[in-house]
Amino acid sequence: MPIIVNLDVMMARRKMSLNELSEKVDLTLSNLSILKTGKAKAIRFSTLESLCKALDCQPGDLLEYGKS
């Protein structure tokens, strides 16, 4: 998959656990885990916005394009 999700990197930089992020963005742990491991097929803009707000980052900090 050419889109790389850097959620784990941003969480580590912010010293935030999956449980804490789950509470802040109102997503289940399983859905966040799917995003974190890069297994997600899609992401809603509203979810991306919530993640950026909670992690104080830009969408480009969470997503990047990598050639396969």
Image (cartoon, rainbow, N blue to C red):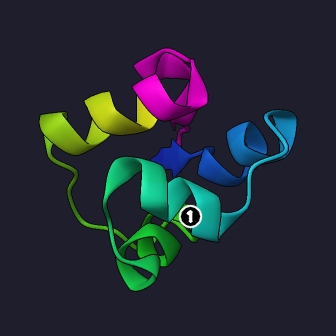
Q: Residue at x 70, y 37 (%)?
A: 10
Tell me the magenta residue range: 53-68
Corner quadrant of residue 21: bottom right
Is 18 above or below relative to 31? Answer: above
Is 29 above or below relative to 38? Answer: below
Q: Is residue 38 left or right of residue 30?
A: right
Is residue 43 visible in this depiction of the protein? yes
Q: Residue at x 51, y 76 (%)?
A: 33
Asked whether residue 45 is drawn in magenta, I would say no
SS class of the residue under badge 1?
helix
Is 58 above or below relative to 46? Answer: above
Residue 61, percent across and down?
A: 58, 23
Q: Nearer the viewer, residue 33 or 41?
A: 33
Asked whether residue 60 is drawn in magenta, I would say yes
Is residue 65 visible in this depiction of the protein? no
Q: Is residue 15 left or right of residue 66?
A: right
Amino acid, disc 1: Lys
Residue 49, percent across and down?
A: 28, 28
Q: Residue at x 42, y 84 (%)?
A: 30
Corner quadrant of residue 15: top right
- Look at mark 1 in the image and give the residue it sits on: 36
